[in-house]
Amino acid sequence: MDYTTISADKIFDGNAFLQDGSALRVNEKGFILEILSSQAASTIENIKKYEGILLPGLVNAHCHLELSWMHNLIASEKGLCQFIQEVQRVRKNEIREQTIASAQRADKELYASGVSLVGDICNSDITFQIKANSPIFYHSFIELFGILKDEADEIVEKGHLLNVSLKNCMGKKAYGSSLSPHAPYSVSKKLFGGILNYNYKIGAAQSIHVHESQDELDFFLEKESCIENFLANIDRVPDDQSFKGIRPMDWALAHMSKCNKIVLVHNTVSTSKDIEKALAFSKMLWWCLCPKANLYIEKQLPALDVMLNSNLPICIGTDSLASNQSLNLIDELYTLQSHFPQLSLEMMLQWITKNGAEALDLFHQFGKIEVGRQPGICLIRKVDFQSLKLSSDSDSIRII
Ligand SMILES: [Zn+2]
């Protein structure tokens, strides 16, 4: 059988660094045949040695492929309401061919940067064919919103039809999917209920944007909030106000399936108390950070030190090119490292491998270097090995 033996300055297996000098024996299809200790590797000639860190294919836990065409079209640092309004305004000029071409380019870039698994939010079928033809494994979060209770059934039905269309497009290619509420402020109690029933039956991971801005908290806590005006402007005043006075995360979790994993995206304004309450609700929560998008939209980062104190399982997403300059996970980690210098590289690498795969319920397949697996192999280059930190030039490429 054809195989190659590869090594690098360091190998990270999804959980920890292997002993320096270790090597991997990999066949032409990318299956890991053997993990060689440094002692075993030292007796072997013809080891292909890379400069940098080898690790399993990366996991981008939160992306919106279909918004890729909005790169550089949405003004930054204007806050969440302005951002959503801008997206809606720009969307009026959407040209289908352009959207497809940009999403295709983004898919290729993700793959080339070593990403093997993506949790992707979709509002339409426009990226389904791209996903069907991509070497990346996609979990599609079919995102729903609707604040009026009378429209809830129809919206769930639309979500179901999109899910059927996804299944038809994917053919024999493996994929994941579920319905996902957009955010606590954009989904009625009834729609939450419809999504819960649907996901409970299919048993897949779900996701929600939550605690993304102070405006979201204010809207729930009956303070002045631009979300109130925004909804009024589009003639969508909630006909059920029972969420008022409750924190958005509490509200959302109370209406989501406890039996499915939940990826909580953003948490820019979550507090230690929010975290404590969420943990009391379920142990199946994953905390997805999109730091560059948070800086782009809100000029703010989550209280990562508080999250680390609570030992939360963190994963990382890039969000979309509407709110980011790149879909590059190493850039996301570098941004976090710049703001939280105490972060260890080993821990951050867990976030973009093992934790991301666990969040999407695909850890049996992705996020770990183990004999018999085919997780894809990625190389992080230009690491500062003196301090074991990422440098501003660090990047990642696909090896296998
Ligand atoms: Zn998002």
Image (tube, rainbow, N blue to C red):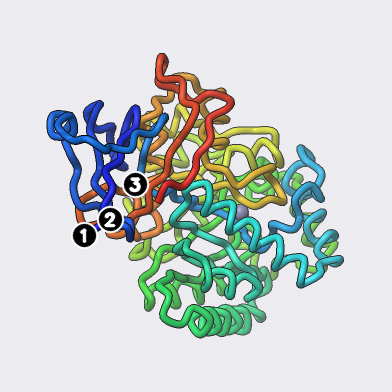
Task: Give amino acid for label 3.
Answer: Lys
| Pointer 1 residue | 1
Helix, strand or loop at mark 2: strand
Horizontally, is 298 left or right of 87 in the view?
A: left
**Can residue 207 be seen?**
yes
**Mark 1 neighbour class, 10 Å CA radius: few under 14, some 14 to 19, many 20 or more:** few
| Nearer to me, 21 or 217 | 21
Q: Which of the two labelled residues, at mark 1 and mark 3, occupies the earlier sequence position?
A: 1
Horizontally, is 297 left or right of 372 in the view?
A: right
| Nearer to me, 275 or 14 | 14
| Pointer 2 residue | 27
Task: Give amino acid for label 2.
Answer: Asn
Image position of 332 with respect to 4: above or below: above
Image position of 220 with respect to 381: above or below: below
Q: CA distance from mark 1 to mark 2?
A: 8 Å
Q: CA distance from mark 3 to mark 2?
A: 22 Å
| Nearer to me, 17 or 63 | 17
Q: CA distance from mark 1 to mark 3?
A: 29 Å
Task: Give amino acid for label 1.
Answer: Met
Q: Residue furthest front?
A: 45
Q: Which of the two labelled residues, at mark 3 and mark 2, occupies the earlier sequence position?
A: 2
Quadrant observed for ligand 1 in the rendered image: bottom right
